Image (cartoon, grey):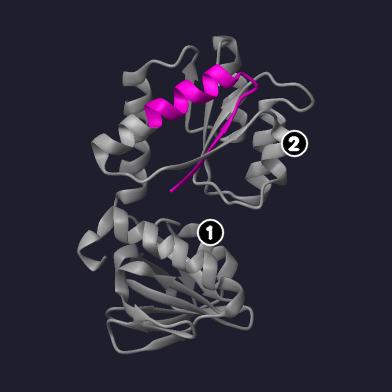
Amino acid sequence: MFIAVCDDEKVMQNNLIYLLNEYGEKKGVDFSAAKFENGYDLLRSPRTFEIVFMDYLMEGINGIETARKIREANGRCAIIFISAYPEAALDSFEVGTFRFLKKPVDKQKLFRALDDYFKSVDSDNFLTIKTRDGVWKIKISDIIYAEAQGKHTVIRTVKECREVFVHLKIIENKLPSQKFARCHRAYVASFEHIRNHTNNEILFDNGEKAQLGKAYIKKFKEAFRNYIIRYDSKML
């Protein structure tokens, strides 16, 4: 999984990444961490990060404004603020911070925050969507894929298939990025239900197929490999 450390102190960056690697070895999580010394560099990165560790005070653009811009582009990113100023905690929650950690970062508190994060994304939640017939409550692990049909979306689950009057992008943002990925402009696929794939299409465990678009291949393969490493190492 991709993590960003945005802090203008190199010692802090290195210490935090050291602890993240220790946690990853202990828990079997494959972290890929990128370091940034200011918010501008972070915002210019083409990478989509699942967790961002954010310093509160930085030159040019502070952590709050940086987090606010991240939220505009990536609503699912977990932002963990790190600061020597505990009074900044209240401000940080204005941008939906996941945790606030005081500098110097305590290893046990950091590990608890990461444990809580993984519990939150691993829980088998439900997706609730309004349909023509009322409200449809879907078990997320049952979703095989979602397909765009104009401004509507067809959701295929292990039990049924329904068309909902919601744009595919909205559905995508509600699904956990560790288990789902856009594989085509018209498809979002569940890694859990993929039997195999080529460079052109995906075969699901129900026998159906979805297209794999050229523009999505690299990012899709990278995300699928991270899923296998974390959840299903027997597929490697």
Secondary structure under the numbered disc 1 in the rendered image: helix
Q: Position of residue 105 (x, y in %)?
A: 44, 16
Disc 1 + disc 2, Cβ < 8 Å:
no
- Residue placed at 33% from the left, 79% from the top? 196
| Number of numbered discs | 2
- Left/right of residue 124 with respect to residue 42 in the rendered view: left
- Residue placed at 28% from the left, 78% from the top? 158
Q: Position of residue 62 (x, y in %)?
A: 72, 25
Rendered image quadrant of residue 24: top left
Query: Which circle marks residue 173 in the picture?
Result: 1
Type of residue at label 2? Tyr
Q: Is residue 16 magenta?
A: yes
Q: Position of residue 180 (x, y in %)?
A: 43, 64
- Residue placed at 33% from the left, 55% from the top? 125
Closer to the camera, 47 or 136?
47
Circle nearer the N terminus (1, 2): 2
Q: Is residue 181 above or below residue 102?
A: below
| Magenta span of residues | 1-20
Q: Nearer the viewer, mark 1 or mark 2?
A: 2
Q: Is residue 88 magenta?
A: no
Query: Which circle marks residue 40 in the picture?
Result: 2
Q: Position of residue 128 (x, y in %)?
A: 42, 62
Closer to the camera, 85 or 155?
85
- Left/right of residue 145 with respect to residue 63 in the rendered view: left
